[in-house]
Amino acid sequence: MHLLLTSDTHVPKRARELPAPLLDGIVGADVVFHAGDWVDLPTLELLEGRVSRLVAVYGNNDGPELRSRLPEVARVELEGVRFGVVHETGPAQGRERRCAERFPDLDVLVFGHSHIPWDTTAPGGLRLLNPGSPTDRRRQPNCTYMTAEVVDGRLTEVHLHCL
């Protein structure tokens, strides 16, 4: 199962549209995760119209329209792997411990907010993934998103894509 992970798209504030490589990537994905900060409803509707399955949450920059359509936390099990999606996880220091305590029933947590790519594993095995932002690199060298595979009940082939 092919996954695409993105967050913090901030359209139209940080970009007029989503980058072409990201749009090309979502077409081939079985599941797309979006960890919030869409900013506009048309971007949500664009993804809903193009992806096979969308697992998404709202972020701190998302207004009432997006909050009425998306949860704060989303959970899904895919081929035996338990995923969660949330926008904010707090400061980097202590993140693994906090997330492992808050989400003891997950195998993978996809999050956003910082625009900083992140891939670590907490004690106990929770994998934490932040795909960064495809439209606003902030202090990073590139805008980014991630892809991954689920094979035989395991998350494999996690790749950070630089735009």
Image: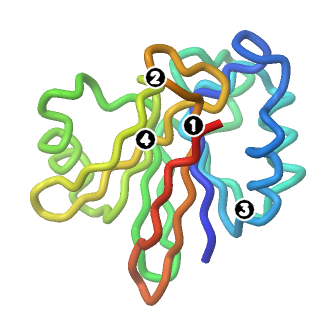
> What amino acid is labelled 3 in the image?
Arg
Q: Which picture quadrant has residue 136? A: top right
Single out the mark in the foreground, 3 or 2: 2
Give coordinates of residue 21: x percent, y percent.
77, 45
Q: For the residues carrying marks 4 and 1, which lies nearer the camera in this image?
A: 1
Q: Is residue 58 above or below residue 33?
A: above
- Image position, residue 108 (x, y; %): 36, 59
Q: CA distance from mark 4 to mark 1?
A: 10 Å
Label 1 crowding class (10 Å Cα cut-off): few <14, some 14-19, many 20+? many
- Given contact means CB atoms under 8 Å apart, are the residues at marks 2 and 4 in contact? no
Q: CA distance from mark 2 to mark 4?
A: 13 Å
Q: Amino acid at mark 4?
A: Asn
* Circle 3 residues within 10 Å: few <14, some 14–19, many ≥20: some
Q: Which residue is mark 3?
A: 53
Residue that carries the numbered disc 1 in the rendered image:
144
Label 2 environment density (alpha carbons within 10 Å; few <14, some 14–19, many ≥20): few
